[in-house]
Image (cartoon, helix red, strand yellow):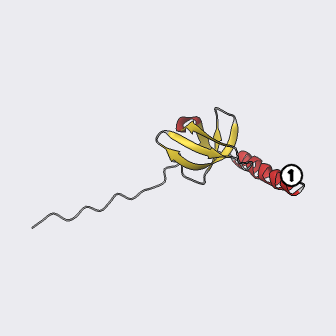
């Protein structure tokens, strides 16, 4: 009798796991941003203003509720300024 086939391991989100779309705080640049991608050990971050940069994943941590509100306020301010043009 052949052994039962192994199922693929399920991917579980660990509490500190990073994922695309997550709001994080970049300790190196001291500002919150949203994760838009990964490249090896690097994380691609984006701000609502369009600013994008790569940073090593150990430099980011999940954002606090206050930092998430900061990012939302920045997005609202940026939209308002764009309408005023």
Q: Residue furthest left?
A: 1
Residue at (70, 39) in percent of width and height: 31
Where, quadrant-wise, is the N terminus in this rendering?
Answer: bottom left
Q: Quadrant of residue 62?
A: top right
Name the residue tied to disc 1: 81
Report whether 54 appears left or right of 84: left
Number of numbered discs: 1
Q: Is residue 31 above or below residue 1?
A: above
Q: Residue furthest top?
A: 28
Residue at (45, 56) in percent of width and height: 12
Q: Quadrant of residue 45?
A: top right
Report whether 31 appears left or right of 38: right
Q: Position of residue 39 (x, y in %)?
A: 49, 43
Q: Position of residue 71 (x, y in %)?
A: 74, 48
Report whether 37 appears left or right of 73: left
Q: Position of residue 84 (x, y in %)?
A: 90, 55
Where, quadrant-wise, is the C terminus in this rendering?
Answer: bottom right
Residue at (51, 46) in percent of width and height: 38
Q: Secondary structure at mark 1?
A: helix
Q: Quick one: label 1, few (<14), some, or many (20+) residues within 10 Å?
A: few
Q: Residue furthest bottom?
A: 1
Residue at (75, 50) in percent of width and height: 69
Q: Position of residue 17 (x, y in %)?
A: 51, 47
């Amino acid at each position: 009798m052949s052994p039962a086939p192994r199922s693929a391991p399920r991917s579980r989100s660990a509490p500190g796991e990073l994922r695309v779309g997550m709001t994080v705080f970049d300790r190196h640049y001291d500002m919150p941003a949203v994760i838009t991608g990964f490249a090896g050990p690097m994380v691609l971050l984006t701000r609502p203003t369009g600013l994008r940069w790569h940073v090593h994943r150990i430099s980011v941590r999940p954002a606090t509720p206050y930092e998430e509100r900061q990012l939302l306020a920045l997005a609202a301010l940026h939209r308002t300024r764009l309408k005023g043009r």
